[in-house]
Amino acid sequence: MTMTANELRASLQELLRLLQFSDIALTFRPVVIQRVSSGRRRVTWSPSLRRSPQLFHGSFATPDEYRAWIEAESYSALLYDGSFLQLSYDFHGTSMVAHRLVFYPCPYEIDLGLLKEEPTLDVIDLYEGGGSTIRLASPLRFEYDSAGQAEGHPASHLTINGEHCRWAVTSPLSPGHFIRFVFRHFYPSLWRNVEFIREWPQIPGPKTISDSEESMLHVSCGRH
């Protein structure tokens, strides 16, 4: 991806603003650039005072995990149906070296009107305690780590349905790849009717999939 950290921060901020302006997102966290180590910066959602150090160590794809992320305000955008998006990119110098892109469906079939009228955590409390139907919908997590490639751990991969599922992806994803994928497959009405989602630019990344990974079923980002 050829964008700088500052350019990416501005682009993500505009994307999230448009999602809220279009009533697709209930709210979003400001996009910030954090220094995470010497020479390494992270373009990510603004941290909250509610942040918990246990967020990355909970059970995968459970209502408790979903609630923990919401409670800590650890998301880029909270969507109109209670699902949330996370978009985070790491840079070392001018090179993008890692990303975390998550679509986390809301586990409850929530009255959409309530989410607009009441605090989100109050609505979740109501559905947690009311014997509500739980949706068996897995989060999707696209991760990339330029230094993390190993046997069974592709540099760019999709985790779905289980923590140890790492489905190889041909390259890192730009925000456009991720946003188009999520809305095309999970929000078809919005995909048909919201032009900026369909046209958000997809910036090709370098091919990172190994020959052995490519010989098996994998996710392709298109031409390189």
Image: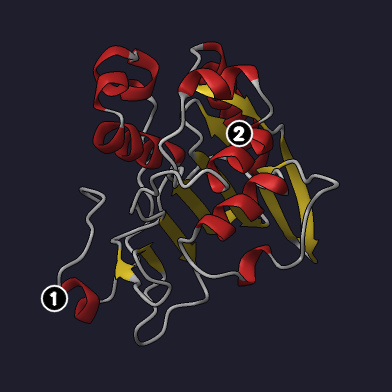
- Residue 128 lies left or right of residue 93; in this view the side is left
Q: Is residue 88 above or below residue 109?
A: below
Rendered location of residue 145, percent (x, y) = 51, 67
The amino acid type of the residue labelled 2 equals: Val
Rendered location of residue 27, percent (x, y) = 63, 26
Q: Secondary structure at mark 1?
A: loop
- Quarter where residue 70 is shown: top right
- Quarter where residue 120 is shown: top right
Q: Is residue 59 above or below residue 26?
A: below
Identify residue for label 1: 215
Q: Which mark is residue 181?
A: none
**Is residue 94 in view?**
no
- Residue 180 lies left or right of residue 19; in this view the side is left
Residue at x-position 45% and y-position 61%: 61
Q: Secondary structure at mark 2?
A: helix
**Is residue 51 in view?**
yes
Rendered location of residue 109, percent (x, y) = 40, 36
Between 90 and 4, the one nearer to me in the picture:
90
Q: Residue furthest front?
A: 130
Are discs 2 and 1 less than 8 Å apart at CB?
no
The amino acid type of the residue labelled 1 equals: Ser
- Quarter where residue 125 is shown: top right
Residue at x-position 74% and y-position 39%: 32
10 Å neighbourhood of mark 2: few (<14), some, or many (≥20)? some
Q: Is residue 221 above or below residue 20?
A: below
Rendered location of residue 16, percent (x, y) = 57, 26
The image shows a total of numbered marks equal to: 2
Q: Tell me the mark number nearer the camera, choosing from 2 and 1.
A: 2
Between 72 and 205, the one nearer to me in the picture:
72
Identify residue for label 2: 123
Between 111 and 172, the one nearer to me in the picture:
111
